[in-house]
Image: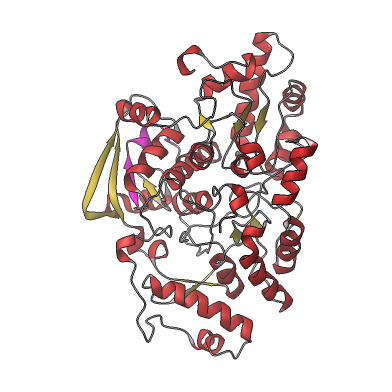
């Protein structure tokens, strides 16, 4: 789903990885049997035969064909709330909007109210010039249409429920271990599969909606016990807790879309999956999902299936990848500089992609305020933005009013849109953006920097000498 006006950067695979992007190994994809191999229940067969209406028939036929392509044996019922990745209304998604409209006009809704990825722009908290806004309005000329169709199809709150981190407790869309889902946002898929132990393949946009309309998804790949077995052992031998974006990047580029079992991290994440570790696991997983196409990782002593089954999750004949300090340094030095002015000073700092957790928002606000207080200056020297959902933002503002007041007084802002999409818009894509997100780095021209370097930039307006 590429809109040429977006520069081909939305919906593409910048790493050119040879993957199916379902979480199901490319080698296992096969043409469906001429007579079909997926077994249907009596209720599903009635739907397939059109006895429950033409629209549901079209939906289930598409889902079944998709499942048979990857050897699915059945459909499974879905639990928890759906989440959809389509969040930009442009001419590039007209085919999807046509399907959405047909479903909505037929009175159909998703099996439960859904959330969606963040929208591309937030003119209130990340404003652009009038000329740029006019250009943006021409590009995202179908936002009202998308919002209306989402409302009719069952979006939970079309004014608020936009976030790629839909699983955070503030969002209220957190799956339980073992829940079956049909999601399409790669970072959310990775976190919910890995840190929560729910089950979803990396579904394409459109397929997610059809699955969530019929309330069922094909049983293959990451939905199965066999598909969740690891074929890589990742042996972490770093001398300190590795940066989540770096270790995630290393894993993603090595294993592509295969499942890995990570050892060595239990030294650092001793409490397992908690509110405090959610941000770290979120960012690690998002980097594996964008630098590669990983839909699931296990982490010894940390993630739920690894706690339950341990190294029994490793397949026979697994490969081993050792990550030490030198390997992470090699990965970092391999990142390209895509700024047109490669020696220019960054024009903006973008923090958070995927959207920040509550803990990350508090941590970064404290970091910025403390550094600014120490510097004695009265405003950030590089425009700085902390991206998060409206719900996380509301909690942060309610629980830390003094900190928020100081953060805003220094000139930082908290937009609720998608930084990656913002950077992918042609009118903004030429800006020199510094980010702490590997996902934003991969999909746009933004450059990745470590936290201390970004803090220096925020306070002084200049990058440290060692990274210029």
- What is the residue that sits farthest to the left in this orientation? 317
Q: Kindly tell me whether residue 138 is visible in this rendering.
A: yes
Residue 315, compared with residue 345, is above or below; it is: below
Is residue 190 depicted above or below 183 in this figure?
above
* Highlighted magenta segment, given as a residue range: 259-270
Residue 324 in magenta stretch: no
Q: Is residue 37 left or right of residue 137?
A: left
Q: How many circles with numbers are drawn on the protein?
A: 0
Q: Residue at x 59, y 24 (%)?
A: 346
Expressed as whole percent of the image width and height from the top left, the position of residue 15 reads 41, 45
What's the residue at 62%, 87% (across, down)? 52
Q: Is residue 43 left or right of residue 87?
A: left
121, above or below 105, in the image: above
Q: Give the x, y percent position of residue 440.
A: 54, 39
Closest to the observer, 201 or 66: 66
Q: Residue at x 54, y 50 (%)?
A: 8
Task: Find out whether residue 260 is within the magenta segment.
Answer: yes
Q: Is residue 110 visible?
A: no
Instruction: Relative to 286, say whether 434 is above or below.
Output: above
In which quarter of the view is residue 418 placed? top right
Q: Is residue 141 left or right of residue 46?
A: right
Could you tell me which residue is drawn at 77 percent across and 25 percent down? 405
Residue 136 percent location from the top left of the image:
72, 45
């Amino acid at each position: 789903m590429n809109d040429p006006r977006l520069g081909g950067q939305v919906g593409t695979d910048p790493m050119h990885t040879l993957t199916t992007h379902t979480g199901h190994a490319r080698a296992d994809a096969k043409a469906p049997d001429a007579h079909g191999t997926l077994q249907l229940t009596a209720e599903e067969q009635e739907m397939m035969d059109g006895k429950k209406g033409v629209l549901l028939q079209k939906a289930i036929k598409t889902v079944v064909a998709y499942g048979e392509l990857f050897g699915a044996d059945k459909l499974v019922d879905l639990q928890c709330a759906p989440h959809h990745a389509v969040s930009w209304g442009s001419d590039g998604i007209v085919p999807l909007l046509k399907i959405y409209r047909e479903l909505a006009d037929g009175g159909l809704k998703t099996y439960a109210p859904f959330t969606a990825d963040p929208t591309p722009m937030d003119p209130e908290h990340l404003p652009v010039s009038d000329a740029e806004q006019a250009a943006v309005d021409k590009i995202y000329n179908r936002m009202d249409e998308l919002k209306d169709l989402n409302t009719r199809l069952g979006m939970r709150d079309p004014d608020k429920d936009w976030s790629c981190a839909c699983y955070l407790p503030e969002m209220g869309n957190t799956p339980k271990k073992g829940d079956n889902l049909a999601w399409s946002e790669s970072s959310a898929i990775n976190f919910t599969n890995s840190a929560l132990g729910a089950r979803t393949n990396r579904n394409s946009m459109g397929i997610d909606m059809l699955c969530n309309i019929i309330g069922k998804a094909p049983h293959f790949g990451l939905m199965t016990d066999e598909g969740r077995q690891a074929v890589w052992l990742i042996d972490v031998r770093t001398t300190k807790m590795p940066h989540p974006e770096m270790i995630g990047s290393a894993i993603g580029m090595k294993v592509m879309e295969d499942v890995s079992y990570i050892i060595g991290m239990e030294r650092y994440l001793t409490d397992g999956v908690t509110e405090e570790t959610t941000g770290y696991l979120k960012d690690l997983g998002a980097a594996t999902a964008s630098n590669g196409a990983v839909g699931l990782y296990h982490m010894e002593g940390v993630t739920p299936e690894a706690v339950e089954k341990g190294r029994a999750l490793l397949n026979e004949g697994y490969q081993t990848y050792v990550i030490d300090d030198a390997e992470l340094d090699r990965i970092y030095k391999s990142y390209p500089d895509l700024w047109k002015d490669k020696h220019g000073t960054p024009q903006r700092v973008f923090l958070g992609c995927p959207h920040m957790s509550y803990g990350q928002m508090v941590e970064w606000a404290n970091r910025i305020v403390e550094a600014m207080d120490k510097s004695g200056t009265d405003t950030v020297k590089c425009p700085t933005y902390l991206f998060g959902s409206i719900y996380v933002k509301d909690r942060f503002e309610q629980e830390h009013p003094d900190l928020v007041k100081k953060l805003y007084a220094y000139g930082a802002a908290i937009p609720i849109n998608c930084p990656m999409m913002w950077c992918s818009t042609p009118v903004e894509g030429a800006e020199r953006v510094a980010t702490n997100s590997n996902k934003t780095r991969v999909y746009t021209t933004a450059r990745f920097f470590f936290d201390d370097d970004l803090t220096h930039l925020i306070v002084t307006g200049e990058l440290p000498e060692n990274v210029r």
